[in-house]
Amino acid sequence: MTIHIDGSLGEGGGQVLRTALALSALTGQPTQISNIRARRRNPGLAPQHLAGVKALAMICPAAVKGASIGSSRVDFAPGGPVQAGKYVFDVSALAGQGSAGAVTLLLQTLLWPLLFAEGESHLTLRGGTHVAWSPPADYIRDVLLPTLAPMGVAVSCELTAWGFYPVGGGELQVTIQPMAEPLRPLELTERGALEKISGAGVAGELPAHIAQRISSRATNVLRQAQLSAAISPERVRSQGPGAGIFLTAAYAHSRAGFSALGKQGKPSDAVADEACEALLTHHIAGAPVDPHLADQILLPLALADGRSVFRTSQITQHLLTNADVIRAFIDAEIVIDGAEGEPGTVTVIGIGL
């Protein structure tokens, strides 16, 4: 039976597509996703979304209709079990045009199907590693994967080249060990004491003083809030210019990540302030799970064997939408206690895949 998903559901962005595709590959159920990214300024498949469709179709293998730039509907029918292996996926090559499409969003599509495949997988993902509206590579490495490790997830990633918008050209190396047993449930209700804040102010193909300015400003802002931080300036090699800041707050029982990217006309101080404001808002809320982590861990918790519960500093439309898509494919019980925009508690009874 084909699972029909309305891509305009909830926040109406690319996460609907990524979650639906991953669950289609995992469960073997064909899916038809219509109204793709209907709530975005440029609706339909963008290069990074098309890359995800094509890459996943290669590892299933799947029959696909509607795999083209701008398409508002995709029909995806897995043709067999997901095949572990060594893969190279370049967003530009898959999309058929130059793109700084986010490799971290491509990874969101591929990670869970490959985690449950028979055998180790190694991915080389090329495109944008630090671009707007997507988790930076640092977040995957320093926040998401350490959070998932207690569940039995053995995945490592290495940033081997930086890629900023609009040029891209970054590279992420990912090694995925297959699950030997069902995912363990997770409880993240208390974060414990703040142990450290670390990070970097980064400039690629730009003067070094930009990285220094960003890191110094962030250090001072956090110091004024009575939080010490180790934030270093870092000049990196990239194919195009770019700048940003990437912060990790490590608590006794959890991690949280915050970032901001520079752009032409945006002062370095504004870049630092944006990331620090997000960190301080989360810190004051007192919850272990930051808003971005909440929607990223929802799918693995739904696949886990047993009851998971976590508290997040903000319930987002992304989280609510992801829950609706997951429920369309599997019988996981997901209860979100709290209002959108406010702190809340999420309880998940997983299916024990």
Image (cartoon, grey):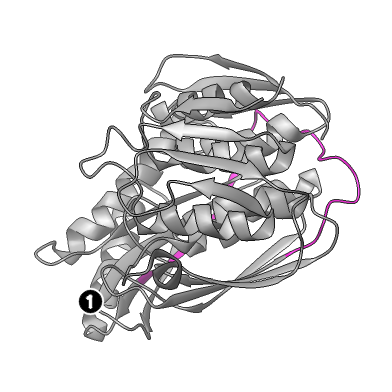
Quadrant where the N terminus is found in the figure: top right
Out of 122 and 288, give the one closest to the viewer. 122
| Neighbourhood count class around disc 1 (C-alpha, 10 Å): few under 14, some 14–19, many 20 upward | many
Task: Look at the picture and state if 85 lies above or below 340.
Answer: below
- Residue drawn at point x = 35 percent, y = 82 percent: 238
Q: Is residue 13 left or right of residue 165?
A: right
**Relative image position of residue 183 (x, y in whole percent):** 81, 40
Quadrant placement of the C terminus: top right
Figure disc tally: 1
Magenta-drawn stretch contains 115: no
> In percent of the image, x 53 and y 31: which residue is there?
287
Residue at which label 1 appears: 210
Which residue is located at x 29 percent, y 54 percent? 221
Is residue 113 visible in the rendered structure shown here? Answer: yes
User: What residue occupies the far right of the structure in this picture?
Assistant: 180
Between residues 240 and 294, which one lies in front from this camera angle?
240
Give the image quarter of residue 267.
Answer: bottom left
x, y percent for residue 12: 36, 31
Q: Position of residue 2 (x, y in %)?
A: 61, 27
Q: Relative to 40, is 107 on the left or the right?
A: right
Magenta segment boundaries in residue numbering: 176-201
Q: Horizontal and vertical percent for residue 79? A: 71, 48
Membership of 182 in magenta stretch: yes
Query: SS at mark 1?
Result: helix
Task: Determine whether, in the image, residue 98 is placed left or right of residue 250.
Answer: left
User: Could you tell me if residue 228 is visible in this image?
Assistant: no
The amino acid on which the numbered mark 1 sits, given as a three-letter code, is Ile
Q: Is residue 90 above or below residue 304?
A: below
Give 3 or 337, whichever is nearer the viewer: 3
Q: Residue 24, located in which quarter of the rendered image?
A: top right
The image quarter in which residue 185 lies: top right
Q: Residue furthest left?
A: 265
